[in-house]
Image (cartoon, rainbow, N blue to C red):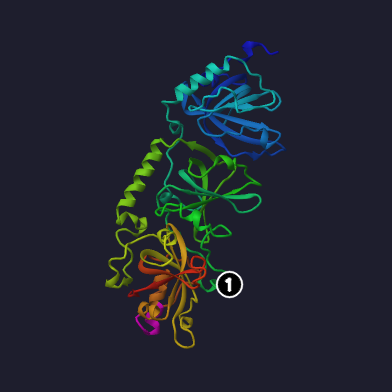
Amino acid sequence: MRNRDDYRFLRLADAMTALNQKVNLIGIIAEYGTPTRSRGTDWFCSLRIVDESHNVRGLLVNIFAETQEKLPQVKASGDIIQLSHVLMKTHNKETYALFNKKFSSFALYEGKHGENYNPYQISSMFWPRNQDTMFVDGLRKWVDNFQLDSVSEESVLLRQIKDGQCYDLVCKVLHVSQVDQEEWMLFVWDGSDAPPPQLLSELHTEKENPLPLQLEPQPLAREALCKFPTIGTILRVSVDQKNVKLNISSVSAGRWIKFINLMFKVHEGLWCGVLTSSTKVRFLPNEHLVILERQRNFEKRLSSKLDQMPFTSFPWPCRITEVDDKVEGVPLVTLMDVMTYPQVTGKYKCIVRVVAALPWTIQDFRSPDGTYRIRLTLEDPTGRIHAYLFAEDGEVFFEGNPPMDALIRKWNTLLGVAEVDSGGVIENAPRNPPWVLCCIKSYYVDKNDVWGSRKYRIFDTKLVC
């Protein structure tokens, strides 16, 4: 049996000075990283822990184990970890604790709301003692008045992200979906609008390679979609479990989390987040100050008609379209409002971008009998839909049959196609379609399957640029 003094806990501040010594620690888990494979055959994860003596940045703990299951399976930030025989080291001017699978051990306890003093996970070499409960109880009482998020830098809002950059993001998990055997997708939201990215797709490829309406292989069921907020971007976060392990069962819908060092990318003109080996996850309590601020901002947007507009469309969308005066009473809504409207049929006004069209060549807009038939892909910060310009609605939209040169100019402006002074277009240039106001109606084509056959049309809208 090990000597009782061998289990004496050091305060984290004291442990920072015990370089190259084996120490025993107990602290609150402020953040934890996603488990990844090390360069060898082991699995690796990192934690950052705090206590009353060292609560600004916290102490980094690097942990190695033979399998992913033997790493700490942290349920939530704010839980407590007890570490025995970890080696204090330094690298790149940062002091950290190294957990060695040969001689170190750990135990995990529930955090401040926990009532059970038995650990919910222990490593194979862990040796409990009666005094452990005293330290666990002390940490639970201390963390009651400590804001865990104070140990790291401020996070960004989705409206501040840039392609190819990593940021910290506080967000709410709305939905978790398994899209493949080893891949999951998290649908997260913070109430703000992600910036509209430039489009790199070429219009003439829309038939063979259409711009997708969503990143997941199959659209979400209507029941799931109807639970989403109707304002703010729904960010898809891809979790490839082959490369980065995440405890999916702990990332449940309704929880607020903080991603630390999450990669943001644009794919097919849609924003997505990507977990990397350096990404860490922190679970936040609902009463966290940042969460309360996010919720207040969302409620403010809900109560204001102007604040429901896309953030980058202020003070008003581009005036290249006009809607008929008779639809003035139709409310201004988002595409998520349209998609989750409780009735199959309805009329709406939306501020959108036209990101694709089929057919895209003006000469093919009409059928052989002269009827307009065009499918537009519309987007706003909340989603994408296909909406059709058909027959008399097309006549209204294009104001009859304007001269070809005028129609080409209007069309290029609507789709954000870059032009040169001579009237030609710049080949392969990124497109940045403007925000425009339009009227949309929903309808069905099969009375035996009204929801399954639901479609959208643009009506009472004119292209006037």
Q: Residue furthest front?
A: 448
Residue at 39% from the left image edge and 82% from the top image edge: 405
Q: Residue at x 59, y 43 (%)?
A: 248
Residue flagged by tag 1: what amino acid is it? Answer: Glu
Q: From this viewpoint, is residue 89 visible? A: no
Residue 271, given in percent of the width and then of the height, sits at 49, 55
Question: Could you tell me residue 38's position as x and y percent?
Answer: 67, 38
Looking at the rendered structure, the secondary structure element under dot 1 is: loop
In magenta, the rendered stretch is 399-408
**Total marks drawn?**
1
- Residue beneath the point at 55% across and 24% down: 116
Q: Nearer the viewer, residue 345 or 307?
A: 345
Screen quadrant of the N terminus: top right
Give residue 9's position: percent from left, percent from top: 57, 17
**Residue 402 counted in the magenta span:** yes
Q: Is residue 104 magenta?
A: no
Whether residue 44 can be seen here: yes
The residue tagged 1 is 208
140 lies left or right of 84: left
Q: Position of residue 453 (x, y in %)?
A: 51, 69
